[in-house]
Image (tube, coloured by chain):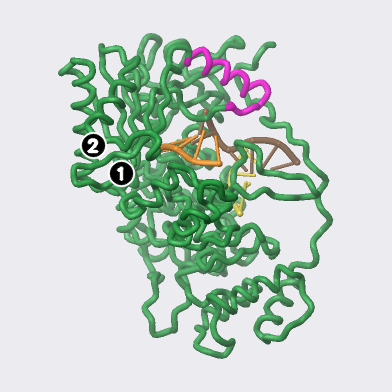
Chain colours: A green, B brown, C orange, D yellow
Amino acid sequence: MQQPESGPRPAKRLRTSEPAPPPSPLPAAAAADALAGWSAMKPQPQPPQLQQQQRQAGSSAGPAGPAAFVSPEWLEQSLAQGQPLPAAGFPPPEEPEVLTPVAGGRSSRQGSCPSVREGARPGSRESIRSGSTQRRQGGVDADDRRRWLGEDMWHEGCATMGAVELMLQGVFSEERSRQIGNEPLVQALSELSKYEGALAADSKLEGGVELGSERGEINERALQYARAAASVRACAYRLCPPVRAHQLPFVAESTADKICQILETGTCAPLEFFRADQPVRDSRGRVRPDSAGGATRARFCKLPGVAQKTAERWWQLGLRSFDDVERAAQPGGPLAEGGEAPIGTEARFSLEHREDLLEGTRREEVLEMMAAVQAGVQAVTGAAEGWKVEVVGGGRRSQAAHDADFCVTHPSVPLEGVLLQLRGHLVREGRLFPPGEAMFRTQHGRMPTHIERLRHEHLRRLSSGTPSRRTLDRFDRLHAIYRTAAGRACRIDVIFVPPDEWAFGFLGWVGSKTFLRHMRRLADDRGMFLNSHRLFAVQDGQSVMVPDEAPPRHAGGKPHWPPGWAPGRRVEHERDIFELLGLPYREPHKRDMPG
DNA sequence: AGGCAT
DNA sequence: CGTAT
DNA sequence: GCCT
């Protein structure tokens, strides 16, 4: 079948969509009932979900009584949300506020908070629509784009590009965002994303048909909060209320509301409910029963070897803390061998060493591990010179990281088999906890045929929209637990990248995850396919490597060599990939889009 | 309404 | 089911 | 939940 060489490709996934469920009971009425029923503290006939929520709110986090020590903000937000909020996030008025709205941004050319515009009231239809004549793709008009990006990053093309490309013009540095004053807001949105992400295992039952449990399905709320958090991190001025919908990319009505609440009170309803392990409500005001336990489940997910399904399992067993889990894993408990949900080897180890593993990896430990990897590859290959061992992952983007990631290559020594030798070496040296005791996963031997497989993957995606079955890269890799000289346990990843794929592998392993999603979406928009191995395009129905076999594609999918590029030039550095995609280069510490 | 990274 | 950015 |  002949493939189109340019232009938008067909719909990616053919979903069998069920007819929409009948409209739910009036959300406003239900919400009013819930609040009235709660504040009056009188038992009224109600749906079981509401009763459950009230019990939880009253017993754990709710205030002792409606008239006691609640702040005006608490009352206001509870009314706005149509539900009583946990009181924890609403300190009495004399307490210092977490976030203090301050007029005027450091980088703002306007000299005052640019969100305050003449006449427009926050959140009103008037203010939302007022800029619509100017608005381009991405929902954000040119003036707002320019203020969001800042003068240094702004250029003419920014006025009309799509939202994904616009985002990639930004600078994503936690340090910069902190200096501007937006980092507390970034952290709040990122926290929401993590709670939503921890719930991703929940299967949504609609019309009796299970949705969202298929592999590859995503949690749209987690994704959206991550995008919004990234957008705020790149914002060049200090955000202060009122924040309008479409004032910055990936922030529309719903998120703008939450941002205003966070800026005014330090928190918002879903955040407080998640923190209190209570179920949150969807945008239509309906309780999402599967969202109970967000904070506890997100904490469980931090253990290596534990993800959404296991965390949900533990929550449903009534486990509420690591101590609970530890007790349940004792002989006779539900998580013991022969129990109803036996804990895995990796999770058991992680639980035991949680103090080490949850603390994260210190700088000197990263350097210790890097030296061990460097010495290890030299020892097992006998090649003393030429090894390149680079810190990647969060440790490359910033100082703080939960684990240590290393990309390894050599210009002439064949990498086949080196991973297995290194693995054995580090175990013999006592530096890695051995298999059977802790996380110890390796992938090897997938490299020899990987390019042809990637081409097929690319074409299959293009024609049928079917996503690849396997989503991780094909490099030889090791995921394990390292024992430092001081005896601490640290998560370590070692990835062997062949020299001709170095730039792609390095880019893919430096991340961040959210940054990569944006880059790969942009490649897709351009009719290309980007992964940790290569950049591909389609030509004559074939998948071809860019730039080795074909020029990159630009807007409209047209083949076009960027300045400085011509047939024969190869990708050597990360910067080359940015150029082929038509993006401004960003150093790793400026790719730190939060997740 | 379809798509959301690989 | 968990693994990576 | 936001963008196209």
Above or below for A32 versus A551: below
Between disc 2 and disc 1, whose residue precedes?
2
Indicate the quadrant containing the N terminus of chain A: top left, top right, bottom left or bottom right.
top right
Q: Is residue A182 left or right of residue A459?
A: left
Q: Do pointers 2 and 1 mark residues of a single chain?
A: yes
Q: Secondary structure at mark 2?
A: helix
Task: Give the number of callouts.
Answer: 2
Chain for numbered disc 2: A
Q: Residue A562: where, in percent of width, then height?
A: 41, 21
Disc 1 target residue: A490
Q: Which mark is residue A369?
A: 2
Looking at the rendering, the stretch of residues picked out in magenta corresponds to A450-469
Tell which of A474 and A454 is nearer to you.
A474
Do tag 2 and tag 1 residues touch (Cβ < 8 Å)? yes
Q: Could you say which is closer to the camera, residue A305 or residue A267? A: A305
Q: Is residue A357 magenta?
A: no
